[in-house]
Amino acid sequence: MSLKIAIVGRPNVGKSTLFNRLAGRKLAIVDDRPGVTRDRKFATGRLGDLDLMLIDTAGFEDVTDESLEARMRRQTELAVKECELALFLIDAREGITPSDRVFGEILRKAGKRVILVANKAEGRQGDAGTMEAYTLGLGEPIPISAEHGEGLADLYAAVLEKIPGVGVEDDDDEDEHAAAGPVCDELFEQDEAVDDGKPIRLAIVGRPNAGKSTLVNKLIGDLDRLLTGPEAGITRDAVSVEWEWQGRAVRLVDTAGLRRKARVQEKLEKLSTADSIRAITFAEVVLLIMDATHPFETQDLQIADLVEREGRGLVFVLAKWDLVEDQAQTLKDFIEHANRMLPQVRGAPVIALSAETGYGLNKLMPAVLKLHRDWSTKVKTRDLNDWLGMAVQRHPPPSVGGKRIKPKYIAQIKARPPTFVLNCSRADEMPEQYRRYLVNSLRESFDLPGVPIRITVKSGANPFERIAIRPADRLKPRQKMDLDREVKAQRAARAANPPTPGAKKAVHKAKPIRPSTRPLRGPGSRRPGPKR
């Protein structure tokens, strides 16, 4: 069983760095600026032979109003409440600050097991801060360097001392771990096989302040899981949330808002944007959240095109639907506009909802599951070739250079997304318009609305084609060397004496045959002899 550990402390003491170090991969955004982490971020990790469930938290701020810092503090308090062990990080180079003393008192009153960790203690610069940490009354501080991985052995020993027996597992636990297999990464692993037992990876993307985090909180039924508020750009990390809907496991990934590339100037926002794009790349279905009062701006079109190019299923979500007056006409206009501007995902489901009131939430997950099934579909080869015959008969391929392209055979080579290979003659000359016609006909005939479809056109090898054998291929190695040497000498001679421009080549013409002037003689005549 994994030990749940919360990494807490004031801003910019290295919590996310230690989180990434124990997780074994860079999951949390790290920057020199304080206050980068805002939401609680969960991940599995290891410390020695200990399996850990890590919780990365926001920096502790001593405020209690309704500001963003106060909401971040409540997220940290929730992490302390649900953990089994808290790692209280301090900056050994700066020493103990008043915020450290306030937070240390809160941890002492919470009644949780606490290990005091003095981070950034590499070299001798942190010796004074480490000694000063004894004044907090939380036991002996453990000097470490999360950036360089120093002191983790001492931290391992401190964990075993705080929670005796945490590293001892009985046979049942070992069998359970062996059956479970390796732990999958939230965003990295991707299985091409269709397996209903695995969770559906669902990424929520959109422009800033479109209501993504509010929607996730409403879906899982926990309004305090993700940090929300009227401020734009609250979410910075891609936060993964495990959820179950009607017995089906779902992994929700909330992402930071995506702005136009020209407006992204700061390093921190660039990291957040890269994290969001990475979440799209490793998702299966993507929810594009748009403000219903201002839908389909330029950035929304670019995000939808990115999702299609990555081959992911796309669902349009019109959030804040309670603010729209003429809802029926607005929805109709939106669907027409989506089919016209994004024909490559024609028929993608459109869900109008309000996360505040709960309107339309019951339609979201059925649409996601249907799209996921269509995205994972496999079509029989016989049905594909029957469709190909009817599609070619309905609209024959065009003629290029006086010769018609002849489709011969089609087969599906993979799913997720559906990918097909079309074998035809003169494949490199097939127009893009006819390829789009085949994609649209395939989507309509097999009921695959909104699913990205890939068709690769290639020409088959001619089995009657023979490879011409040159005379030089029959020569022995020594003869080939002599022939190559002679060819190089001739080329060098031609290069040294190039032909004069304008000079005409000598043409040898055969002499014309002139008719004879002698009279013809009969068979009995004889040639006269010489004159005497």
Image (cartoon, rainbow, N blue to C red):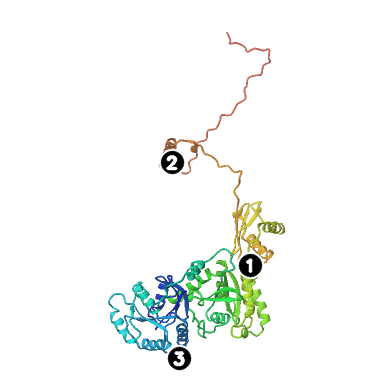
| Mark pair 1, 3: CA separation | 49 Å
Which residue does the numbered mark 3 point to in the structure image?
Answer: 64
Residue 266 visible in image: no
Image coordinates for residue 511, horizontal then vertical, percent: 56, 29
521 sits to left or right of 170? right
- For marks 2 and 1, give the one nearer the viewer: 1
For image coordinates 52% across by 68% down, the residue present is: 281
Say which label, 2 or 3, has the lower sequence index: 3
Q: Which mark is residue 374?
A: 1
Disc 2 marks a residue whose amino acid type is Arg
What element does badge 1 sit on?
Answer: helix
| 201 and 353: which is toward the camera | 201
* Residue designated by label 2: 491
Residue type of the residue flagged with mark 1:
Asp
Residue at 68% in and 80% down = 329
Secondary structure of the residue carrying tag 3 is loop
- In depth, the one of 455 and 132 nearer the eye is 132
- The kind of residue on which mark 3 rests is Thr
Q: Quadrant of residue 486?
A: top left
Disc nearest the viewer among 2 and 3: 3
Closer to the chain start, of discs 1 and 3, is: 3
Label 1 environment density (alpha carbons within 10 Å; few <14, some 14–19, many ≥20): many
- Vertically, is 116 above or below 408? below
Outermost residue toward the top in this view = 532
Taking 457 as reference, is 145 left or right?
A: left
| Rendered-image quadrant of the C terminus | top right
Q: Is residue 381 visible?
A: yes
Residue 171 at x, y percent in the picture: 47, 69
